[in-house]
Amino acid sequence: MSLFEENSLTPWQEGPFAHLSQQLAQDQLPHSILVLGEDGVGRDDFCQFVAQWMLCNAPDKGQGYCGQCKSCQLFEAGTHPDYHLLQIEEGKTQIAISQVRELIEHMQESAHQAGWKLANITDIHALNASSFNALLKTLEEPQENTLLLLQAEQLQGVPATIKSRAQILKVGVTNTSMTREWLKQRHDFFDEEMETALQLFPTAPYKVEAFVENGEAFKSGEFIFDYADVITATQPPMDIAQRWQEELENCVFWCQLMFHDVLLLQQGGKENDIQLQKQHKALAEIASTVNAKGVTLLLNKIIEIQRLIKLKSPANLMASWQSFLIYSAQIAIKYKKLES
Ligand SMILES: [Zn+2]
C-alpha cells in the first residue's frame, strides 16, 4: 500500500511537509528542492504527495490534497499536463538527455491549469553530465510558479552546482523505534522475522515491510546455509555467487548480520544472544571454521560492497559480489580456526 493511495503522510514525512507548507504560505518556496532520503522511507511517495497537493484546486493547506477535484483526478490518472515525472525508462540505466530536454520545454510553457508546474526527477544520480548541464539552465533561469523536485538517496555524488541552487530537504527516519512504532500500527503482528528485518533496515520502514511480505527473510535464511557451504568448501563459491545474484543486495545486508553473529559466537555468545537464531547451525559452523581475524576481514569486504550498492554501481557490484565469494573460500583456508 503506498502513501499515495492512503492520502496521508507517515510520521517522518510530516515535518518536511509542514516546512514546505509554511514556505508556500509565506510565498517563499524555492524553485528547486533536493529531496534527500534513503530508499525505503517513501521518498518518491512524498514527492508525489507534494506535487499533487500543489496542483490540487482545493488543497487543505496544512493537510494535503483533496483527492476529488479535476486536478487531483488528472494527477491520479497520470495525465496531469502540468506534472512531469522523470525516471529511468525500462531497460535503461540512465535518464536520457532527450527526456531532460523534453522536460525543460514543458517547464518553459505556460501552465495548462493556470496554477503551478511541477517536475519530479526520481533519481538525480541517473542523470549524466550533459543532462546535468541542460538541467542547470532551468535551475538558473526558473520560470514563475514552477517547482523542480530532485530526488537523491544521499548528498554524496550530487554535483556542487545542483547543491548550491536547490534547497535541501531531508526525509528520513532517525531511529529504530520510529520504524517499530509505525510497523506496529500497520500490522497486527510483530514477530521474530520482522524484528530481524528491522535490524537489517532500521531506518527504512518500507524495506522492512517488503522484506517480510515478500518472504525474503526465509530466502535469505537459505543463503546463509549456502554461504556456510562455501566456508566449509562443500560448494563452489561461483555457484553460490550465481545462485544468489538476483538477491545480491539482501544477501549483502544478511552477511553483515551474519558476521556480527559469528564474532559474537566466537566471543562466547550463546544461541539466544544472536540475531539470526534460525541460522544458528550454519553460523556455528562458520564460527568454528574461520578465526576472528578472518571473519573481520570478510566483514570489511562486505562493508565495501555495501558502499558500492549505495553508489548504485551495478557493473562493479556484480564483479565484487563474485570476488567476495571467492575471497571467502580463500579466507577460510588462510585463516583456519585452530582447535583450542
Ligand atoms: Zn484536489
Image (spheres, helix red, strand yellow):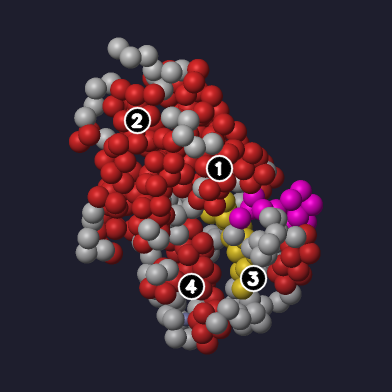
- Per the model, the C-alpha gap separating discs 4 and 3 is 14 Å
Q: Secondary structure at mark 4?
A: helix
In this figure, which residue is indicated by the disc labeled 2? Answer: 285
Q: Nearer the viewer, residue 169 or 327?
A: 327
- Per the model, the C-alpha gap separating discs 1 and 3 is 44 Å
Residue type, label 4: Trp
Q: Nearer the viewer, residue 110 or 226?
A: 226
- Please indicate whether residue 192 sits to the left or right of residue 63 in the image: left
Q: Is residue 126 magenta?
A: yes
Numbered mark located on residue 53 in the image: 4
Q: Nearer the viewer, residue 227 or 206?
A: 227
Task: Say which label, 2 or 1, has the lower sequence index.
Answer: 1
Q: Secondary structure at mark 2?
A: helix
Q: Is residue 100 above or below residue 264?
A: below
Q: Main secondary structure of the magenta part?
A: helix
Q: Is residue 93 above or below residue 164?
A: below
- Please indicate whether residue 298 sits to the left or right of residue 200 in the image: right
Q: Identify the residue at horizontal 42%, vertical 80% (top origin).
A: 66
Task: Say which label, 2 or 3, has the lower sequence index.
Answer: 3
Residue type, label 3: His
Within 10 angstroms of label 1, few (less than 14), some, or many (20 or more) residues?
A: few
Residue type, label 2: Glu
How many numbered marks appear? 4
